[in-house]
Image (cartoon, rainbow, N blue to C red):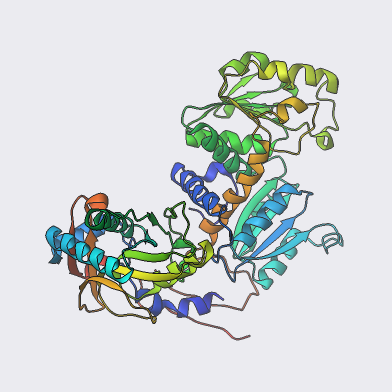
């Protein structure tokens, strides 16, 4: 049994610390300082404003929309989008969080992870349009896990995906509906997203993987 | 966290808090229309019960099943243990079947510790003799934290048969780690000789302890272990150490009453106390499933360590650097028998 698991090693290393919440904050900040800046606070704000407008267009005024952020950094992004929708159109869109830890496909390959918080708005998600929100879209495995988690909570009318950065290298047939920035990357590079709510500043940087120790 | 959960004394503060926090999230997920999670799919959990137990075994079984693990129940009655098979041979059998975790209850103190040397998977102590019952202590701490909002500085009185109680032992160690103050209350005959070395205080007078208690935990009078005369009569025990309505009135307003079950209503706890809103007895059972899910999740997900003891004669599998190993590419060697 263990042998089969271990031989799947390369698949596991293929989605390294770039995945949301995967790296300890210390290395994250360290690599960010060394990396190349991709988006600053103003660009992040504009990207979210644009995504907000796109959500309003594509969902007919966002009346049935529920925003669910994937911890850690998807959650503040979902809240910001909800604020944006309230400002521009005056619609109150519920925002919550969806932890996917227990649905991951790499649980056997890594030490046990701390669980994040799942907070589904009281109205539920049945018949609603759920917009999943995450910071970086990479292999697509996080989103796959999120779709599984969603299925255990209810049956939305549609599920859409909003990400701040799409860095490519998909390993599953998953595509985003709303993208803040398309960022062509090499697999060895790491995209670091920092947000004021979690890290004290807004920035997106691109760094080399070697500082991550693997 | 360690690979096994054998003693509450082995848990660091970080480990204990991680288990309680994980249990908190899992308890919230249990409210959903579909409480089942795919997390331990394909993993096998063996319940190895050498002593009778309903609630602990069912609780572990429910916890493993909610996490989608396969559960094999093994009770000593009607198995080859009744034919004289030793613990070690049973362990090797379980090993050969590929158990990822073994939950063991045994009448001998230390049995889980021995078992941990013989099996490759994780060993979870579900009560060994008069030694420990760590998941019970964890669920008690979880229940206290949920009801009272904190554990640090909490005054907890544990009342009754401390001598034979693995629940009391585990609670003393875990609550010390979590920063609560424990007072043991019992007749001198039901306290262990070594109690002076435990991190807690001792009293022989229940009524004087109650006004200064945030939590009072009543232990069962274990008739099956009472071959000697530890107290003159059940009636006298009840009068001095039983919790009835009048005694409960001595407690502060916020205090809660706990009991690990099964209860002897009318002996250590009166029916009116057991059924009062202060009693957390039913909650403890519900919380037990969440806490055991947390323990199984934290022990079983994550990488298998490469330095696990290999059992002699086991020629099945693999040594692997594993994806988290630092030695570059992972090595996989499979020996075909």
Residue located 75% across and 33% down the image: B220
- Residue B148 screen position, x and y as percent: 52, 31
Between A202 and B231, the one lying in front of the other is A202
Q: Quadrant of residue A176?
A: bottom left
Q: Please indicate, yes or no, whether residue A151 appears anywhere in the rendered image.
A: yes
Q: Please indicate, yes or no, whether residue B204 appears anywhere in the rendered image.
A: no
Q: Residue furthest bottom?
A: B336
Image quarter of the C terminus of chain B: bottom right
Residue located 69% across and 46% down the image: B127
Q: Relative to B269, is B45 on the left or the right?
A: left
Q: Quadrant of residue B246?
A: top right
Residue located 53% across and 74% down the image: A2
- Residue B151 screen position, x and y as percent: 49, 33
Q: Residue furthest top?
A: B208
B257 shown above or below A129: above
Q: Relative to B329, is B180 on the left or the right?
A: right
Say how many tags the image has: 0
Between B336 and A197, the one lying in front of the other is A197
Between B24 and B326, the one lying in front of the other is B24
Residue located 20% across and 75% down the image: A183
- Residue B44 screen position, x and y as percent: 63, 67
Q: Quadrant of residue B79?
A: bottom right
- Residue A135 screen position, x and y as percent: 28, 64
B246 shown above or below B10: above
């Amino acid at each position: 049994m263990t042998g089969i698991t271990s031989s799947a090693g390369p698949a596991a290393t293929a989605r390294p610390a770039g995945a949301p919440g995967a790296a300890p904050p210390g290395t994250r900040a360290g690599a960010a300082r060394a990396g190349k800046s991709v988006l600053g606070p103003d660009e992040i704000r504009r990207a979210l404003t644009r995504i907000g407008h796109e959500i309003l267009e594509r969902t007919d005024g966002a009346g049935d929309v529920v925003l669910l952020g994937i911890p850690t950094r998807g959650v503040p992004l979902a809240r910001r989008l909800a604020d944006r929708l309230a400002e521009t159109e005056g619609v109150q869109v519920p925002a919550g969080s969806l932890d996917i830890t227990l649905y991951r496909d790499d649980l056997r390959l890594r030490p046990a992870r701390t669980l994040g918080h799942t907070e589904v708005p009281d109205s539920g998600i049945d018949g609603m349009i759920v917009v999943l929100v995450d910071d970086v879209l990479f292999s697509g495995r996080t989103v796959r896990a999120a779709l599984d988690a969603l299925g255990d909570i209810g049956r939305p009318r549609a599920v859409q995906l909003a990400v701040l950065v799409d860095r490519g290298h998909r390993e599953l047939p998953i595509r985003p509906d709303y993208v803040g920035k398309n960022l062509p990357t090499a697999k060895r590079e790491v995209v670091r997203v920092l947000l004021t709510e979690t890290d004290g500043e807004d920035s997106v940087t691109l760094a080399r993987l070697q500082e991550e120790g693997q | 966290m360690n690979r096994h959960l054998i003693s509450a004394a082995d848990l660091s503060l970080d480990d204990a808090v991680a288990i309680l926090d994980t249990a908190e999230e899992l308890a919230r997920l249990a409210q959903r229309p579909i409480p089942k999670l795919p997390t331990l799919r394909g993993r096998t959990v063996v319940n190895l019960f050498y002593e009778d137990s309903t609630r602990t075994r069912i609780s572990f079984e429910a916890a493993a099943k909610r996490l989608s693990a396969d559960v094999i129940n093994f009770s000593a009655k009607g198995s080859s243990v009744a034919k004289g098979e030793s613990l070690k041979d049973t362990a090797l059998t379980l090993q050969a079947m590929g158990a990822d975790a073994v939950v063991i209850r045994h009448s001998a103190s230390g049995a889980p510790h021995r078992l941990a040397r013989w099996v490759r998977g994780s060993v979870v102590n579900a009560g060994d003799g008069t030694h420990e019952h760590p998941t019970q202590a964890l669920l008690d701490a979880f229940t206290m934290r949920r009801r009272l909002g904190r554990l640090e500085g909490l005054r907890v009185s544990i009342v009754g048969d401390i001598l034979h109680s693995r629940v009391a032992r585990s609670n003393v160690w875990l609550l010390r780690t979590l920063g609560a103050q424990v007072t043991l209350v019992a007749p001198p005959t039901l306290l262990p000789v070594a109690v002076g070395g435990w991190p807690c205080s001792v009293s022989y007078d229940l009524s004087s302890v109650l006004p200064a208690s945030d939590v009072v935990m009543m232990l069962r009078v274990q008739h099956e272990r009472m071959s000697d005369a530890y107290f003159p009569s059940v009636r006298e025990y009840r009068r001095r150490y039983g919790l009835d309505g009048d005694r409960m009135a001595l407690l502060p307003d916020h205090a809660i009453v706990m009991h690990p079950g099964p209860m002897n209503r009318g002996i250590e706890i009166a029916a009116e106390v057991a059924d009062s809103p202060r009693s957390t007895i039913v909650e403890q059972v519900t919380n037990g499933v969440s806490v055991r899910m947390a323990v199984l999740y934290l022990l079983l997900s994550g990488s298998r360590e490469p330095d696990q003891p290999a059992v002699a004669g086991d020629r099945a599998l693999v040594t692997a650097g594993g994806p988290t190993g630092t030695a570059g590419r992972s090595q996989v060697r499979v020996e075909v028998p």
